[in-house]
Amino acid sequence: MFKMRTIAFATLAATALASSPALARDNDNDGDDFKFDLVRSKGLANFPTVAPHAHGQVKIESVGPVEIMKVKVWGLPPNTGFDLFVIQVPNGPFGLSWYQGDIQSNKDGVGYGEFIGRFNIETFIVAPGVAAAPSDPFHDPKRIPDAAQNLTTNPIQTYHLGLWFNNPQDVVKAGGPGTVTPLTESMTLVSRS
């Protein structure tokens, strides 16, 4: 399972969903939650058959020291696994990204995921110094290899979400390329609510 997630992260992805903090809204006026819509990326223009009706909605609610993020997506290929990432920017090359969890679409192409973590204005990635990365535990020559070390960076905010096909074969079935490469913009969904 993790092997497929890793391949999918490195695969030209078929769907990515992202948010715009400026467009978020708190619908119950208590100041502790907000919602935003997810729509198909312009990067999919060259692949009109790949999830042509993909949409979604995200609700994030604060529960003290963490947030609960509920992601609902529809218009996806049915019975297909997807991987959710928190990403730096909504369009390729996406910047820094981390794997958050899985969403599985049902027979109607609808998927739902609920995640607990920090998903607010303070969400960021930082690397105060260079450190050696753990050795690659997968030893799979088909995977794009892990980095040997990180780069140093000041805090970088990560306000967007990306949802990618879990399996590159599903990208091909949906009408997209099956090339295993680092993430690119051409196969993403982003929010533009």
Image: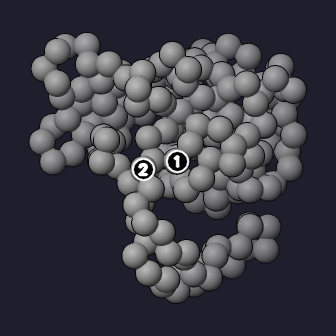
Q: Residue at x 73, y 16 (%)?
A: 52
Q: Is residue 24 visible?
A: yes
The quarter holding residue 166 reads top right
Residue identifier under label 1: 88
Q: Residue at x 42, y 21 (%)?
A: 23
Residue identifier under label 2: 157
The spot of residue 95 in percent (x, y) is 59, 53
The spot of residue 100 in percent (x, y) is 45, 49
Count of marks, rendered view? 2
* Marks 1 & 2, CB-CB < 8 Å contact: yes
Task: Give the answer, above or below, for where 159 lies relative to 37.
Answer: below
Report helix, strand or loop for mark 2. strand
Between 6 and 26, the one lying in front of the other is: 26
Horizontally, is 21 left or right of 102 in the view? left
Q: Which residue is drawn at 53% across and 33% down?
A: 18
Q: Three-letter amino acid code at disc 2?
A: Gln
